Image: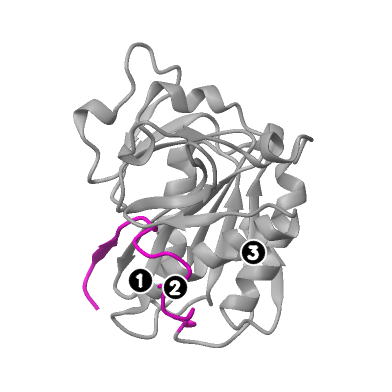
Amino acid sequence: MSDVDVRESGTETPETAEPVRNPRRDDGDLVVVHVGFGSAAVPYLEGWDLQKRVQQRRIDDEIGDTVLLMEHEPVYTAGKRTEPLDRPFGDPGAPVVDVDRGGKITWHGPGQLTGYPIVKLRDSTGGVAMVRVLEHMMMAVCAEFGLTTKFVEGRSGLWVPGAPDRKLGSIGMRVRRGVTIHGFQINCDNDLSWFDRIVPCGIRDVGSTNLSRELGRPVPVAEVVPLVERHLAELLGAPAVLHRTTAQLEA
């Protein structure tokens, strides 16, 4: 399976989308690593290097399917379709890193849960199926909070309905030699003003939001993590979630 970009989600609505298909090649347990949260937030380049090491080990079948969960220090990441006018204007206040995933520019930082599933796919259609899994996982997590969300045809990410719709989460992935890298983000209780300096995911005239704003109470990342783990494991057909440290994973 050759290297491919997987563009961000949002090309289908739940009513028109095909049923979610498990894209995994293997059916073993799902390993989850809590890389760093809060005061231990992970610099983006450090997290990206970890992703690449884990992806290579998954390609070589040294480890099973693994999900890296973390918060990042503030950073803007620009996917391969980012246009010059999408980038930060003025002093961005955070590094801008060009990355090899699909999609355009977005922000990562404290209060946002970022997840990187490193999963070996069953076949060449698995990249799109993996995006569908992440879409439905994020929607299921929001439903646990009583929050209705939707996909918008032609627009990437997960949205809260309104006038205008408000973006709550994003997906951008890449597949190399049949194994995924990069992943998803869910805004929990992050500072939304970071998004004012860019055109998030290249979509103009809409706003960003987070769970805390929509629910009217603080929703920390720690409250969202176990829900993400449970729904992701269910959608990927994993019998169990096994927690490992970064050191254990790389031993």
Residue nearest the viewer, comparing 127 with 137: 137
- x and y, in percent, of residue 152 in the image: 41, 54
Name the amino acid, label 3: Ala
Q: Residue at x 55, y 67 (%)?
A: 136
Q: In the displayed structure, would residue 63 be above or below residue 9?
A: below
Residue nearest the viewer, comparing 42 with 154: 154
Q: Earlier in the sequence, mark 2 or mark 1?
A: 2
Name the amino acid, label 1: Val
- x and y, in percent, of residue 27 in the image: 56, 88
The part of the image, by quadrant, that contains residue 29 is bottom right
Q: Residue at x 62, y 32 (%)?
A: 190
Residue on which the image places disc 2 = 58
* Label 3 crowd (10 A; few <14 / some 14-19 / many >=20): some
Q: Give the prevailing secondary structure in the magenta stretch.
A: loop
The kind of secondary structure element at disc 2 is helix
Q: Residue at x 64, y 59 (%)?
A: 33
- x and y, in percent, of residue 59 in the image: 38, 74
User: Can the viewer see residue 215?
Assistant: yes
Measure how far apart labels 1 and 3 are at the Cα level. 19 Å
Give the magenta-colored segment's residue range.
1-24
The kind of secondary structure element at disc 3 is helix
Q: Quadrant of the C terminus?
A: bottom right
Between disc 2 and disc 1, the foreground one is 1
Residue on which the image places disc 3 = 140
* Label 1 crowd (10 A; few <14 / some 14-19 / many >=20): some
* Residue 211 included in the magenta stretch of the image: no
Q: Is residue 110 left or right of residue 9?
A: right
The part of the image, by quadrant, that contains residue 236 is bottom right
Checking the image for residue 84, the label placed there is none
Q: Are marks 2 and 1 in contact (CB under 8 Å)?
A: no
Q: Earlier in the sequence, mark 1 or mark 3?
A: 1
